[in-house]
Image (cartoon, grey):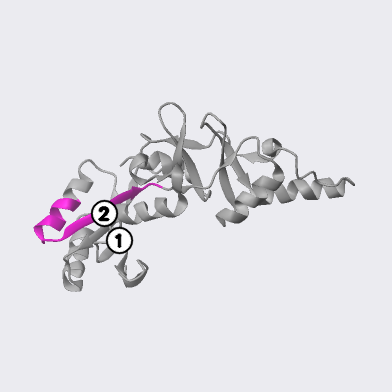
Amino acid sequence: MLVKNNVIPKHRVITIHAEATMKEAKQALDKSGYRCIPVVNSNGEYRGMIFRSRIERHENECFRSGEIPDENEHITNVLAYPKTYVYEETSFPQALLRVKALPFIAVLDKRGKFVGILTHNKVFDLLEQAFGLHAGDYIVTIVSPEKHGAVAQLSKMLNKRGINIEGLMTFDDDGSKVVRRLCITVSNVTKAQLSELFAKLERKGYRVLRSEQIEKNDHMTRTILED
């Protein structure tokens, strides 16, 4: 999955010119309703982000030093994240690593031109899809012995019972090479089938940490079984 398939195009994004003043930046931020907006130069190249908080901090520093903030000062000195962006061809996992806590990340084409943004909300929507939360019924977290073919063996056990895998992710929080956590979203399964499956998994050396039923209304989950 590539970033370009999930971009909000630039014609739908409020941006501001790199040579804009503090006053113009505040007006653009007010219009956008967001705490930051992208900054683009006359060639359509991304130059960073302008945050309301950075402007306010700059103004406070002026007041503390006995100066009156100049609303006609250019925003150059308060730009943030000039090197934080992704390309249209960037993969979703790489974009996830880049966006982190930002409300959005700028997206550039092959020439380095600004083409739009990938929002934080969209990234988490894609994570929901990757986890299979839209189609799955249960999320099962399993500790798997680190052995060749462990995932294939697990998939075979699920397939044998007619249980669909809607999403699967692996986690290795502490760098352990002995065990690995698997988070699997499944559908077409009953509680009775899950209980029987868990017993089988335990006999095969897996450990079921927890099982959660997906609430389809808001994609929140509630625990129904715990090992």
Of the residues shown, which amino acid type is indicated by label 1?
Leu
Q: Residue 111 or 105: which is nearer the viewer? A: 111
Circle 1/circle 2 CB separation < 8 Å: yes
> Which residue is nearer to you in this view: 184 or 48?
48
- Which numbered tag is attached to residue 133? 1
Distance of label 1 from label 2 (alpha carbons): 8 Å
At x 62%, y 44%, the residue is: 50
Q: Which residue does the numbered mark 2 point to in the structure image? A: 167
Pick out the residue farthest to the right.
66
Residue in front for this viewpoint, 110 or 12: 12
Q: Please state, as top left, top right, bottom left or bottom right, where the C terminus lies in the image.
A: bottom left
Count the marks: how many?
2
Residue depicted at x 38% and y 46%: 172
Horizontal and vertical percent position of residue 130: 31, 52
Whole-percent x, y for residue 44 in the image: 51, 32
Q: Indicate the quadrant containing the N terminus: top left, top right, bottom left or bottom right.
A: top left
Q: Vertically, is 46 above or below 32?
A: above
- Residue 166 included in the magenta stretch of the image: yes
What residue span does the magenta drawing correspond to?
154-172
**Local SS, label 1:** loop
- The residue under the point 57% across, 57% down is 33
* 105 in the magenta segment: no
How crowded pointer 1 is (Cα within 10 Å; few <14, some 14-19, many 20+) is rated as: many
- Residue placed at 66% from the left, 50% from the top? 26
Quarter holding residue 48: top right
User: Which amino acid lies under the numbered mark 2 shown in the image of this protein?
Assistant: Gly
Looking at the image, which is closer to me, 209 or 16?
Answer: 16
For the question of whether residue 192 can be seen, the reply is yes
- Label of residue 154 in the image: none
Q: Position of residue 119 (x, y in %)?
A: 45, 49
Residue 81 visible in image? no
